[in-house]
Structures are given as C-alpha cells and as structure tokens.
Image (cartoon, rainbow, N blue to C red):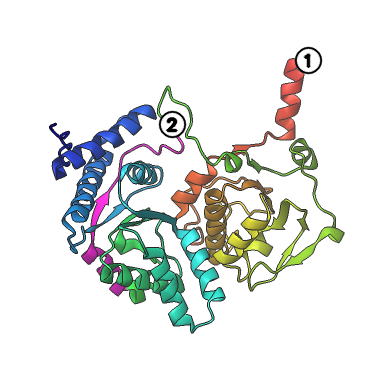
Amino acid sequence: MTPPLRPAARTPRDNMRRLLEGMEHDAGRSGFELEPSQRQAAERLAAFGAQVAGRRRALSRKAPRSLYLHGPVGRGKTWLMDSFHGRLEAPKRRVHFHDFFRKLHSATQDLESGKGTAVQQSVDGLLDGVDVLFFDEFHVHDIGDGMFISRLLRTAAQRRVPLVVTSNYSPDGLLPNPLWHDHFLPTIEAIKEMMDTVEINGATDFRRFPVPGTAPATGHGAFRSGRIVTPGTAQQLGRLGLFRPTPSQSRILNPTTQPIVVRNSDPDLLWVGFEELCGGLTSTLDFLALAEMFRTWVIDDVPSPTEGGAGSAPAWQRFSNVVDVLHDQDITLFLVGRGPLDWDVETNRNVLPVDLARIASRLSLLGRSPSDKDMENEEAAGS
C-alpha cells in the first residue's frame, strides 16, 4: 500500500503570499483597501513573517531584522499589527506600552532581589518562549522609561528575538523633551541599527473618519460612551446621571506612591479635578492603578486648551498620559470644563503636549453633551 503523500512544505514565497493575502482579506472584511503606505508596510510584515517561519524550519539562530512602523495617528498601524499578529504562526507575545511598564513595575516590586536584577528578570520573562515580540504604541516621555526600553532592546538583541513596534514618532522624535533627548540618543541609534523603519502616512485618520459605507471602528465601547461636557451645568450633568459631589465626599487615595485628593470615589466612579489629577507629581503608574479600581471617571474643571496660559506643560502631558491609559483600558470618561474643550487647535503649543495629535484623535471618539440652550431649542421645536 502506497503511503499518503505529505503536503509540500510552504516556501518563503508561499508564506509571504499567504500573510499578505490574509491582511488584504482582513482589510476587505473591514470595508476598505490598503492604501499605498499601508500596503508597503503589509508587504514588509509579510516578508518578515516568512523569515520567521523559515528560521524555525532551518533552526537558524539568525534573527530577522526588527520592524518599526510609525506615522500619524489613525493611519492603521495598530490595525496592521493586529492583523499580522493574528495570522503569524509562531510563538509570539503582544504588549502595549503602558501595560509593559505596569507589569514591569509590579514585577520589580514583587521580586526580592536587587532592583537591577529584578528589572532584568522582568525583561527576560517578557521575552521567554517567544519568537517575536509585538510592542504597540511605543513612545518615551520620561528618561526613567527610556532606561527600561534600553534594557529591553539590548536583551532582545542578545536573545535574537525580533520586535515589531508601532509608534506615532519616528525614532529620532522619541523622548522629545530637550532636557533629556540627548541622553536617549544612544538608544535611538540602537533602534535605527536593529530595526527597519517603515512609515505609514496616508491622508486619512481612520479613527475620526471611518471608510464611507462602513460601520464605525469597533472596540473601546466603554471609552466611546463617555462625553465632553461644557460648560458643565447641573442640568447637563444630571441628564448623564452625574451629580457634583459635596465637600464631605472628598477622599485621599494612594494608588501607588503619590496621594491624590479626589472629590468622590464611589465603588465604580472616580470624580477628580484636573489640577488634583494632573497638576502634582502623579505618574502613569498612578493612572494605571486607578483604572483598575474605577471603570468610570469624571475629570472636572478641565481648562480650555484654547485659552492662553491654561494649565502647565507638565500638567497637560500628564493629562495626555491619562487619556492614553483610559482609552487603552477602555474606561468610560467624562471631561467637564467651563470653556471650549477643543484639542484640534494650533494655539498655545508651548504648553500643550507634544503628542497632541494622538490625544485629539482619541478624544474625538467622545460625544459632546448638548448645552441647556440647545436642549431648550430642541424641546421648543418639538412642541
């Protein structure tokens, strides 16, 4: 009896074609075609995936070059990464920037060894058992975070684990604070040495302007259910089931190391002022800890970004980090302020965060509550 023929092993060209066609299929299923820069990135990802598959078959120790996908917000970087990640047949791990630092911080607190050793053990744990590490929303605003990133890149190179990274920044634009940028230059050079840079720069921000004829982007349903409320009258808030706390409801919370005075902290709702949340020494770790405790946030007394001198540069940067965390953790967010809360502005750039475009894109997902006057006009028109 003739034994059944084994199917022929896929060639690198077969693997590349399969991955590219898979990403094109995912795009079509989502209602759009890959625009030129997205397709270029998809082709580069497919070639990378074919190299990963070939490396496993040949038991080669040579790693494919890592990929650094960057470009403006909403151009499909994370979408491409997710599509490719879902179709790559290899041991892999996907982490988000904030989640990475939360786990790193937790691990270094839990380990009893010296801090340097604890950080290395955490990085090793992230790389253990994977052929590829996917790192989404890569950005660096703090020199301390930069040191952790340097350790991760160095260890990945030593262990021959390639990375696929998405970022709103080119490598040269990382850690833009002029006080610290020069200290990060060696790491920027290492990134450019070990990664191929691919820019995705189409004209459309798909977060704000979904493809005509398709449903809005899915995901982050709780975050999308939030509202921007101006000028924040009692009637506006009441229509949302929100009622300003009394002074007796004020509490002091200690999410990590920094105490924060909040106006209310019901079991599932955190009500806090902009200045109390962003004006002190709070960190992203504080915001991550609070996001685990409260699924609905009200940030009150948010200054208008169009008013000169409203809010300090560090406070706006912390606000930027808050929005990042709440979006990524899919937390319902209500922003309340007296003046216009519009982040699509060209003024006051001296204090607004350097990554304003990303934050404006995320906040565009929030609806806007009508004013009392608009409601009165609507009721009069319907009477």
Confirm whether residue 346 shows in the render. no
Find the residue positioned furthest to the front: 1
Quadrant, the N terminus: top left
Question: What residue sits right under mark 1 in the picture?
Answer: 383
Residue 343: horizontal and vertical position, in percent? Answer: 52, 47
Task: Give the alpha-carbon distance from disc 1 to disc 2, as whole Å.
Answer: 35 Å
Magenta stretch bounds: 185-208
Rendered location of residue 159, percent (x, y): 28, 69
Q: Which residue is mark 2?
A: 210
Q: Position of residue 287 (x, y in %)?
A: 60, 61
Q: Is residue 258 visible?
A: yes
Q: Is residue 383 magenta?
A: no
Image-based side of 145 in relation to 10, left or right: right
Q: Which sits earlier in the primary sequence, circle 1 or circle 2?
A: 2
- Of badges 1 and 2, the one in the foreground is 2
Quadrant hosting residue 189: bottom left
Amino acid carrying mark 1 in the image: Ser
